[in-house]
Image (tube, rainbow, N blue to C red):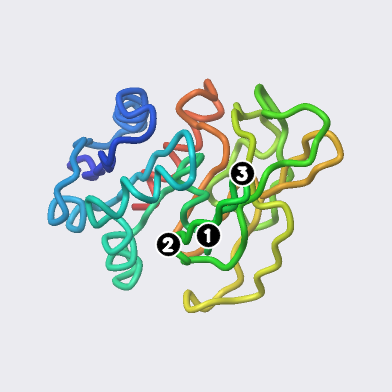
């Protein structure tokens, strides 16, 4: 059986080469590109992201990535967002008092963490929901985070993907935030699976197998 084709979206943000290598090791045939049609047709689309929310959204819009994500999801085609690539899937982000519109695939606000030490950097356990496919076999593992912002207060019962999403949470200090979401074809992680050793590799294999 031939390997599934995955596009890592090149829009000027993210640890692109390490993401490509990690998804290749997970068993996919990977292309790094900003080409709209190639990304639309691939079995899976990975949206990376590091840095400021506003800068990521500007870069994403420049390559029509927001429209690409919407088109893929409308057709039930899988998308995986990582770090700020997860954050931009929410309705908006607020950094330094500046509010930026996101892709609005999920309602919710990305805001600065309120823990005593920010950024949140290093390995952390996560609270995985029942029924997860993404974390199958790695429910009790630790994952690598590096971020100062997150979705801290989020309740989503349902949306146009018909079923309530499976939400994985993590704790930093007294602050609880969304660590991952599984919602039909749309999946996202706040942590970096490509930096999370064996657990991250297993998570990416789970995602590639689902394509």
The spot of residue 80 in percent (x, y) is: 41, 49
Q: Earlier in the sequence, mark 1 or mark 3?
A: 1
- Label 3's element? loop
- Distance from label 1 to label 3 (Cα)? 18 Å
21 or 203, nearer to the observer: 21
Q: Nearer the viewer, mark 1 or mark 3?
A: 3
Q: Is residue 78 above or below residue 104?
A: above
The spot of residue 30 in percent (x, y) is: 22, 36
The spot of residue 38 in percent (x, y) is: 14, 51
Q: Residues within 10 Å of mark 3 (few under 14, many from 20)?
A: few
Q: Residues within 10 Å of mark 1 (few under 14, many from 20)?
A: some
Q: Is residue 146 above or below residue 175?
A: above
* Residue plotted at (57% across, 35% down): 191
Give the residue pinned by disc 3: 96
Q: Is residue 142 left or right of residue 44?
A: right
Q: Is residue 184 left or right of residue 132?
A: left
Q: Do labels 2 and 1 touch, CB within 8 Å? A: yes
* Disc number for residue 103: 2
* Residue plotted at (57% across, 41% down): 190
The spot of residue 145 in percent (x, y) is: 61, 30
Q: Residue furthest right?
A: 174
- Label 2's element? loop
């Amino acid at each position: 059986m031939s390997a599934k084709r995955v596009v890592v979206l090149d829009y000027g943000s993210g640890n692109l080469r390490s993401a490509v290598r990690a998804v290749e090791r997970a068993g996919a045939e990977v292309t790094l590109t900003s080409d709209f049609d190639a990304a639309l047709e691939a079995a899976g689309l990975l949206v990376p992201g590091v840095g400021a929310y506003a800068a990521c959204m500007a870069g994403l819009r420049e390559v029509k990535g927001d429209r690409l994500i919407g088109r893929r999801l409308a057709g039930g085609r899988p998308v995986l967002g990582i770090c700020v690539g997860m954050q931009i899937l929410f309705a908006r982000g607020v950094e330094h008092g500046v509010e930026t519109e996101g892709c609005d695939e999920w309602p919710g606000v990305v805001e600065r963490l309120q823990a005593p030490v920010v950024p949140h950097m290093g390995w952390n356990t996560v609270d995985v929901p029942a029924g997860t496919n993404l974390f199958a076999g790695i429910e009790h593992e630790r994952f690598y985070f590096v971020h100062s912002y997150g979705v801290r207060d989020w309740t989503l019962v349902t949306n146009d993907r018909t079923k309530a999403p499976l939400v994985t949470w993590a704790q930093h200090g007294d602050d609880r935030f969304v660590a991952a979401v599984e919602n039909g074809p749309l999946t996202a992680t706040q942590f970096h699976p490509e930096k999370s050793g064996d657990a991250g590799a297993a998570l990416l294999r789970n995602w590639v197998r689902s394509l």
